[in-house]
Amino acid sequence: MHLVTITRGYWMGEHPVTNGQYRQFVEATGHRSPRYWGDRRFSDPTQPVVGVSWGDAQAFCAWVNAQVPAGSSVRFRIPTEAEWEYAARGRDGRRYPWGNEPLEATRATYGQNLNTGSPS
């Protein structure tokens, strides 16, 4: 660990980018499909998109920014490592966003749904 100071405020999206949202980008731009696009476990339109590279994510952000009305100060980008850590752990260094209590299904969605074979 090392000390980092975040000097400017920022906003972070509350929800991950979905396959449905990413599909709009792919169809509009001809950008390559994500790595797991055809895998039924990871390709539901409402699930978070997976299998994209940093460059893919940058291209998606640029496309989204092109949709923002002219004159708006809103811009989308990938958070820095420090911003991500701060959003996930707060300034007190907790283990999880909710604190240091153990990971369990009432606090986070994780793992794989054994009934469907898809992420929970």
Image (cartoon, rainbow, N blue to C red):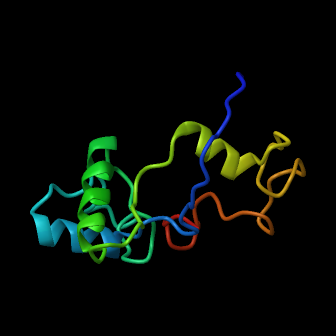
Nearer to us in this view, 47 or 38: 47
- Residue 66 sits in quarter: bottom left
Q: Residue at x 56, y 73 (%)?
A: 115
- Residue 53 sits in quarter: top left
Horizontal and vertical percent for residue 111?
A: 62, 57
Horizontal and vertical percent for residue 63?
A: 23, 63
On the rendered image, what quadrant is the N terminus found in? top right
Horizontal and vertical percent for residue 26?
A: 18, 66
> Seen from this angle, which residue lies furthest front?
71
Nearer to us in this view, 100 or 90: 90
Q: Residue at x 66, y 42 (%)?
A: 85
- Taking the image as shown, residue 85 lies to the left or right of residue 57, namely right
- Residue 76 sits in quarter: bottom left
- Taking the image as shown, residue 119 lies to the left or right of residue 33, namely right
- Taking the image as shown, residue 57 lies to the left or right of residue 98, namely left
> Seen from this angle, which residue lies furthest top?
2
Q: Residue at x 69, y 50 (%)?
A: 88
Q: Residue at x 31, y 55 (%)?
A: 36
> Seen from this angle, which residue lies furthest right?
101
On the rendered image, what quadrant is the C terminus found in? bottom right
Nearer to us in this view, 64 or 5: 5
Q: How many marks?
A: 0
Nearer to us in this view, 15 or 6: 6
- Taking the image as shown, residue 99 lies to the left or right of residue 59, namely right
